[in-house]
Image (cartoon, rainbow, N blue to C red):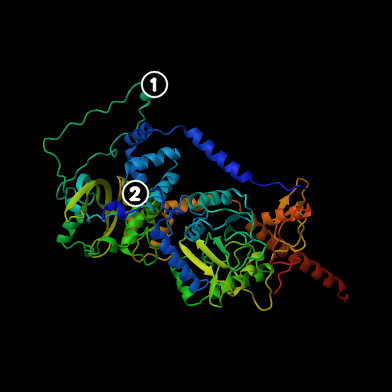
Amino acid sequence: MTLSKLTKPWEAMSYGFIDGSAKREMRRKMLKAVAVPGCQMPYASREVPMARGWGTGGLQVSLTLVKPTTRVKVIDQGADDSVNAASIRRFIASVAGTPTTLDTLEADLIQSRHRIPEEIMCEDQILVLQVPNPEPLRGVQPNMSIARQMHADADYGRMWLQLYEQIVRSGRVMQGASYPSLVHGRHVMTPSPIPRWDVPKLHMSRHLTILSAGREKRIFAVPPFTRVEPLVFDDVPYQVEDHAGLTCYRSGAKGFFMNEIPQDDGSSVYEVSDSEWGVKAIRAKDGEDVIQGETWYKDGEMPQ
Amino acid sequence: MAYVATRGGEAAIDQSERLFREEMGEITPTRIEEVKAALPYLIDRVMGEASLYDEDLAALALAQTGGELYEAVLLLRAWRTTQPRLSIAKPVEQDGLFTHRRISAAFKDVPGGQTLGPTLDYAHRILATNVLRGETFVPPAVVLADKPAKAHLPSVSAWQAENDLVDLPQPDATDGNDIPDLTREPLLFPSKRAHTLQSLARSETGSALALGYAAMRGYGQAHPTVNEVRLSEAEIVVDHPDGRSFSAGRVKISQAEVVDKKGEKLSLGFTATFGWNEVKCIAGATLDLNAPGAEKGSATEEEFFLYHTEGVESSGFCIHFKLPHYVTFQSSLDAMRDAKAKKAAERVAAKTKHQSEPAE
């Protein structure tokens, strides 16, 4: 027995950058998060070679889950070519040797900031959402230890009160993105700053969603076939963004979440926010043979 | 409209990084040596905030980032976190430190004496502009004392404890891998003592100062007296697999003990960090001193200052606002426009109702 037989040859970094002990902790915390849907699990959250707040939580999850055959898609604001998405995709591919894709249907793992793709994801896909602030109660209770206790007690009264006050003041719930949602009838979570349009996509979905906040060191999950219900009053229905009637000026796609592009003449045009979905629509229009997956929204409506 | 492959982002980020690096020029071993020799206090500060003691790596991080401190610290932290733990060094005791400077504001003289050591405290802050006119600044030579100052000194709080003026914290026998490690587990509150001290040790100097200063100015309950500030070198003693202990070298550390005088006994606040960084230690110790019983949400509450003095997290979050946020913005605009439309519709309805009422 020699020392060299006991060890591996020296390498500049571990596979997927993160070392073995950190990955083990990630796996354990992900399993815990899946076991208690919507409940925030604290984790060490190691530094990665990107600034905090730039997807380091999502990145740690992705780097832990990938193997050399995992097809990775990364989007930011729905777009694959957004600078930070491009940077994260390049990093994962370079340290883990994974193939990358822009196609939602082809991806095994999708890391995303602020959007869920428009095409329905299936059982063997994982969605990793980057989370800036994991605490839905932050607005009513900035102290994390008190908020933690409130979750333990399922004490969401102040959350409801906040929504009620918005209705009284403004005639409607003013929450834009990050709409607080009750998971599995127990924990209120933030779905990350996805638009209200995307929240119903988490409800009873077939794919696993892992939400990870690197800077705040919290991880939580929505396992497949789990109830995710936006907090609403019985007599004030949940309202997604009024985008059902908008048409993409580039692709002609209609009935999806849109980016508003201000024009010089004071008006606006709209382009579909899920960039690859837009590309597919253009290609299909041009007569190319593209596979357009089934979408969550049909004619601008989410079937119940 | 033809399909255009929109991959402009990747080319753009590649070029923007190149632009930054091109302006920085070549990084050579000579440059690293120069940074190390010329800027030891900056190296110390970076090593402290990175919680990684390696002057070469710190100099490299500074050279690579052009002195962007938050970037330099992040580089070191990201490197550090992937490194294996080979050994846990033996605890360092106060009187075992090789002390270069130790001063106390609490007494005119203290056991072991006041040792000024290297400091700019009493320097007149005048720029040596002659250097810019081509002259060389030659520092006047230090005249050696007849008798060298004592290298090993007890802490001032040890004397105070002997005189029943202060209760020292109970010695903690936790050893080796059992010591809670902030870099391998999350910070939760109430915080473990080890986590608090580790957090302060790697806190960002400016942030610790800002919150510490707020406490000193009056937003804290305790006014600090500097029991002692110490700059020293600590021996890193580790176990060899054959059972013997040996010194793997020395690291520069700084520490501050501050006390509050309100009760029947003094209470202690403490901070230590890698490298020589007096401001951070005094500010950190002041925060530590103020923490017990601090009101939730105040700047001297542990959760508040430990979260907000974390430089890698705070700077990262600050610059993340540069990322596109147009989806969330669009979502809020939608709610805002709808609320406005609802209000307008209500006004119209109220007006028509008013008009249709019969006149009396």
Disc 1 crowd rating (10 Å Cα; few below 14, some 14-19, many 20+) is: few
Q: Determine if residue B218 is in view.
A: yes
Name the spot of residue B90 as percent of width and height, x first.
22, 56
Judging depth in this view, the residue of B355 and A241 nearest the camera is: A241
How far from the left and from the top, in percent, is residue A65? 49, 61
B82 vs B92, nearest the viewer? B82
| Percent of width and height locating residue A99 | 56, 53
- Seen in the picture, residue A51 relative to A160 is either above or below; the reply is above
Judging depth in this view, the residue of B324 and A46 nearest the camera is: A46
Q: Amino acid at mark 2?
A: Leu
Residue B299 makes an appearance in the image? no
**Residue at (51, 56) in percent of width and height:** A68
Q: Quadrant of the C terminus of chain B?
A: bottom right
- Would residue B208 be found to the left or right of residue A131 on screen? left
Q: Which residue is label 2 attached to?
A: B52
Q: Secondary structure at mark 2?
A: loop
Seen at 36% across and 57% down, the residue is B199
In the displayed structure image, the side of residue B324 where residue B102 appears, left or right: left
- Single out the residue that lies furthest toward the top: B134
Check disc 1 and report the residue beneath it: B133
Q: Chain of mark 2?
A: B
Give the residue at x 37% y 45%.
Answer: B46
The amino acid pointed to by label 1 is Arg
Q: Earlier in the sequence, mark 2 or mark 1?
A: 2
